[in-house]
Image (spheres, rainbow, N blue to C red):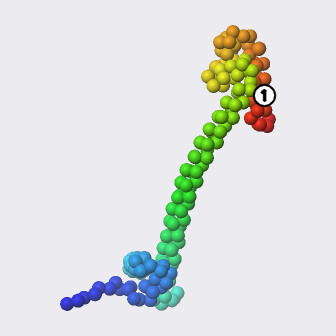
């Protein structure tokens, strides 16, 4: 003996409306079921002066189907945007690593153009993070001379690197 079971909405006008909006049988059945539950729970809200029960149910069905389409589209858009951001982030990280490497090479090349005292002063002050006074003590030079060499060295580095002030 063969029996087939159908939901109350399957094949109904409400089901057809939901299918036409959603274009997906499973989704339309879910929406139809949700509308049945909503009608059951909110039957007291029905106002006969605004139209027939059937029109109320069909309007609810259409509204819920449109809501579902919007929800699915918004979810897909969020996923797409997240995927693009991940790809962009990976690209940006790789690009940034290459740029940093190239900048380091350029700084090394420009450091080679400085005089020995300028290079030592800049290296100690900016790479080893010593104060100007500590640089002067380490190089056994007057503080004023170290400051002058640092200033001259930084100007030459700026010009070599093409930085505009």
Query: Compared to 29, does 75 lie above or below?
Result: above
> Who's the residue at 35% across and 86% down the image?
8
Q: From the viewer's perspective, tell me whether residue 40 is left or right of residue 52.
A: left
**Residue in front for this viewpoint, 8 or 160:** 160
> Who's the residue at 38% across and 85% down the image?
9
Quarter of the image for residue 110 reads top right
Q: From the viewer's perspective, tell me whether residue 83 is left or right of residue 138.
A: left
> Who's the residue at 55% across and 55% down the image?
87
Q: Quadrant of the C terminus?
A: top right
Task: Note whether residue 161 is visible.
Answer: yes
Q: Position of residue 81 (x, y in %)?
A: 55, 60
How many residues crowd mark 1 within 10 Å: few (<14), some (14–19), many (20+)?
Answer: some
Q: Position of residue 7 (x, y in %)?
A: 34, 84
**Residue in front for this viewpoint, 119 or 142:** 119
Q: Position of residue 158 (x, y in %)?
A: 76, 32
Query: Compared to 95, does 122 lie above or below?
Result: above
Query: Compared to 68, does 117 lie above or below?
Result: above
Where does label 1 land, which residue? 155
Return the residue found at the far left.
1
Q: Tag 1's secondary structure?
A: helix
Query: Compared to 39, does 139 lie above or below?
Result: above
Q: Position of residue 163 (x, y in %)?
A: 76, 36
Q: From the viewer's perspective, tell me whether residue 6 is left or right of residue 94.
A: left
User: How many numbered discs sit on the rendered protein?
Assistant: 1
**Residue in front for this viewpoint, 65 or 37:** 65
Q: Quadrant of the N terminus?
A: bottom left
């Amino acid at each position: 003996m063969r029996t087939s079971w159908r939901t109350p909405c399957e094949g109904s006008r409400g089901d057809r409306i939901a299918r036409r909006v959603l274009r997906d049988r499973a989704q339309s059945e879910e929406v139809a079921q949700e509308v049945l539950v909503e009608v059951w729970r909110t039957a007291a809200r029905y106002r006969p002066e605004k139209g027939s029960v059937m029109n109320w149910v069909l309007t609810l069905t259409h509204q819920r189907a449109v809501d579902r389409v919007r929800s699915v589209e918004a979810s897909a858009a969020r996923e797409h945007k997240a995927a693009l951001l991940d790809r962009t982030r990976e690209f940006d990280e790789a690009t940034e690593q290459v740029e940093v490497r190239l900048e380091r090479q350029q700084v090394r090349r420009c450091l080679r153009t400085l005089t020995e005292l300028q290079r030592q002063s800049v290296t100690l002050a900016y790479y080893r993070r010593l104060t100007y006074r500590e640089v002067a003590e380490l190089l056994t030079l007057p503080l004023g001379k170290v400051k002058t060499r640092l200033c001259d060295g930084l100007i030459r580095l700026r010009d070599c690197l093409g930085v505009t002030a």
